[in-house]
Image (spheres, grey):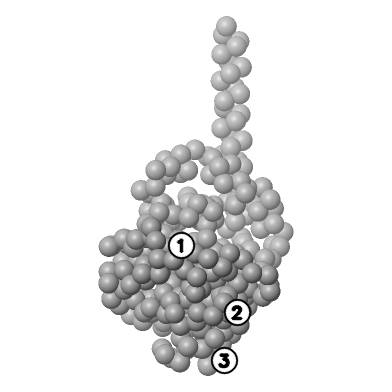
Amino acid sequence: MKKFFSFILKGIIIIVVLAVVLDYGYTQIYLQSQNRGKIDYIYNSQGRQYDVVILGSSRANNHFVSELFEEKGLKTFNFGMSGGHLFEADLLLKLMIERNYKIKNLIVEVDLNLSNDHRAEGIAAKFLPYLHDSSLIKTHFQNEADFASLYYIPFYRYIKFDSQIGFREMFFNGIHKKTSHLENLGYHPLLTNKKGNMKNDLTNLKPLLKNKYYEDIKRICLEQNIRIIPIMTPMCENTKGIQYFDKVKKAYPEIHNYENAVIEDNYFSSCGHMNDAGSRKFTKIIINDFF
């Protein structure tokens, strides 16, 4: 029996040591990465200067053409992330400030994601390699239900979110394989002629009266003397429950409603995402109105 328990104990020790070593190794590789995605591009950088920074979900990533701002002499980067929520946008801005970024104007797409204050699992996971290296990221995740297991169990976060930060992604980071996320100054054009779903239903969507992450973004901008431009971006003509945008405007009067700035279906790739032609038309409107 003693031999059995000794064998089990040795096995547990080996597993724990291996987990610690793997955790350390994976993390060190991520700490050397700077060209796979927008999070590591920010995390492993210092002191960049921008006239315009864009934050939000895919409705920012696909809708604001950085090149058009640059043509007006405005140094710009689109940090919108497909699938992202305001949880991640807030954290990205905090990381930029911590790394001494100088930002004059922040355009933040805040429409549909005002209806929730939880993280987007697939995007939030990409911050987790830095969980032990960054007190800022640790604090941001501290109230999450799974924080203890993510923080205290070595290598657990890499196993749980294998498809986002596991072996494959770690390996590509290790060999510095680039992705398209940083091309076009962060803007991702939807060029395909194939239409996605051209109907949308927002009937059951309600904006939170106080979205804590949006409020945090506003606070940071006030403290850092950053001009914040919160925007609701266009939806296609066949959207049900379009009154959602009126509800947002009522709850947050400072948000600029551009929901109907572009409405024709030929400018959309899907109901909630404009194609490149629509995005260029929309971006020109924003530049004209604010710059």
Residue at x-position 45% and y-position 92%: 288
Residue nearest the viewer, comparing 195 with 240: 240
Write down the residue under mark 1: 201
Write down the residue under mark 3: 71
Q: Position of residue 286 (x, y in %)?
A: 46, 86
Residue 8 left/right relative to 232: right
User: Is residue 98 at least partly visible in the picture?
Assistant: no
Q: Amino acid at mark 1?
A: Asp
Q: Secondary structure at mark 3?
A: helix
In 3D space, how far apart are the residues under numbered discs 2 and 1 (Cα atoms)? Answer: 19 Å
Q: Amino acid at mark 3?
A: Glu
The residue sitting at the top extreme is: 1
Q: Quadrant of the image for the N terminus?
A: top right
Return the disc, 2 or 3, that comes first in the chain's sequence: 3
Q: Secondary structure at mark 2?
A: helix
The vertical placement of 202 against 73, above or below, is: above
User: Is residue 236 at least partly visible in the picture?
Assistant: yes
Residue 172 left/right relative to 144: right
Residue nearest the viewer, comparing 41 with 84: 84
Q: Mark number for residue 249?
A: none
In 3D space, how far apart are the residues under numbered discs 1 and 3 (Cα atoms)? Answer: 36 Å
Residue at x-position 54% and y-position 80%: 264
The vertical placement of 117 against 96, above or below, is: above
Residue 97 left/right relative to 57: left
In 3D space, how far apart are the residues under numbered discs 2 and 3 (Cα atoms)? Answer: 25 Å
Residue at x-position 48% and y-position 55%: 120
* Circles 1 and 3 in contact, beta carbons < 8 Å: no
Q: How many marks?
A: 3
Q: Nearer the viewer, mark 1 or mark 3?
A: 1
Q: Secondary structure at mark 1?
A: strand
Q: Residues within 10 Å of mark 3 (few under 14, many from 20)?
A: few
